[in-house]
Amino acid sequence: MRHRWVICSLLFVGATINYVDRQVLAVLKPTLQAQLGWSEIGYGNIVTAFQAAYAVGMLGVGRFIDRVGARAGLAATAAFWALATMAHAAASGVLGFSAARVALGLGEAGLFPAGGKAIAEWFPRRERAFAMGLFNAGTNVGPIVCPLLAPWLVDVVGWRGTFVAMGALALVWIVPWVVAFRPPERDARVSPEALLALHADRPPTAAPLPWRALLRHRETWAVALGKLITDPAWWLYLFWIPDFLHRKHGLDLPRLGPPLVAIYLLSLFGGVAGGWLSSRLIHRGWSTNAARKTTMLLAAIAVVPVLGAARATSLWAAVGLLGLAVGAHQAFSANLLTLPSDFFPVSSVASVMGIAGMGGAVGGIVIAQTAGHILQATGSYHTLFAIAASAYAVALAVIHVLSPRLAPAVVSTVAEGRA
């Protein structure tokens, strides 16, 4: 079943493009803010527009992908977010950029529900967190590629042409995805023995559960609240680190590249290491519960030093602290994103990830408004980094209370399927 790593690689590339398209606005923020006269609150409102649409999109797209499958669902949403990225080129003010971000949020919401479903279909439990970590690594490579590529594109084609070029990447990616992906049950490369092994450690097959049935399960709330509590820190890093480096350390657009590359290389390492450690512990005989939660606890501890980033006088000290925090987030996230496939049948994984993603996006709305107002009033990132430093321990405690053993949800398919 080596083809599963081809699927994982394509998801990694898709996540990279998704985050290039998402990140380009943050990288260009100092330039656009100077040219177009945005206030901090105005930028916060543009980010909020994306987050609100992403929240709505997550809920609807998860259900859509469980209905049509990961192949068609991800192709359709990738096309939509590609066109939305290009639409930024037509914007000239806060309202126009907000409209483009709404469209982008709706389209980009398809990535994780479809990717999580694809990994649940193609990978056994013992490899799932590692595969999720590799897929999720694209969310770190995108922010590395973007600050290296965007300044050059701005020089060559201007900021409007940069948005068009970035959007075109997703349209190109759709072709190999559609060619390569099939569910393993419909792929001739998968032997009957391999298919039996895949089915052996999944929750029992069932029809897709409706939202109201999924929301009755504590396991759904464990994932959704985990995302609600921790995703604000990720959105803070993603949309405000370039501004922090500009504001605190005086970096202009051409000089942003190396620090952002360093931060997201550490993030890349953290995400892959978090998925690898959890999977390795399961290989060594640990329970899924112990392996996932031990890894998440280590990540929650590793993020705490970010408290010092706002007061660090050295650029590279701040970069190191931020890189450690973003890497710890990704290690935590690689395991959190694996929980829907631990808890529920494959037929409902995208829906659960959609509900959880909506929770994370709501958290992103809160942090966008909070960050805009705090920075407008104080100009300091200290309070924001303090929030990020404490989020993961709180989230892990909530997950443990709601699912002490990370056992699969007890799903009554007849009753709940008709609910």
Image (cartoon, rainbow, N blue to C red):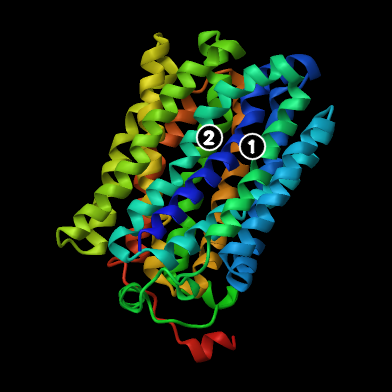
Q: Earlier in the sequence, mark 2 or mark 1?
A: 1
Q: Is residue 45 left or right of residue 132?
A: right
Q: Is residue 308 or residue 80 the one in the foreground?
A: 80
Q: Which residue is mark 2?
A: 142
Q: Is residue 395 visible?
A: no
Q: Is residue 269 above or below residue 6?
A: above
Quarter location, residue 25: top right
The residue at the far front in this view is 188
Name the residue that disc number 1 marks. 21
Quadrant, the C terminus = bottom right
Q: Residue at 47% of width from left, 16% of height from top?
A: 258
- In the displayed orientation, state which residue is furthest to the left: 284
Count residues near mark 1 (Cα–Cα under 10 Å), then give few for <14, some for 14-19, many for 20+: many
Q: Where in the figure is residue 176, as x and y percent of width and height?
A: 58, 52
Q: Secondary structure at mark 2?
A: helix
Q: What label does residue 319 carry, if any?
A: none
Q: Residues within 10 Å of mark 2 (few under 14, many from 20)?
A: many
Look at the numbered discs 2 and 1 and tell me whether their residues touch, using CB distance below 8 Å: yes
Q: Secondary structure at mark 1?
A: helix
Where in the figure is residue 175, as x and y percent of width and height? 63, 52
Quarter location, residue 49: top right
Residue at 34% over, 35% down: 269
- Residue at 41%, 19% (x, y): give it: 319
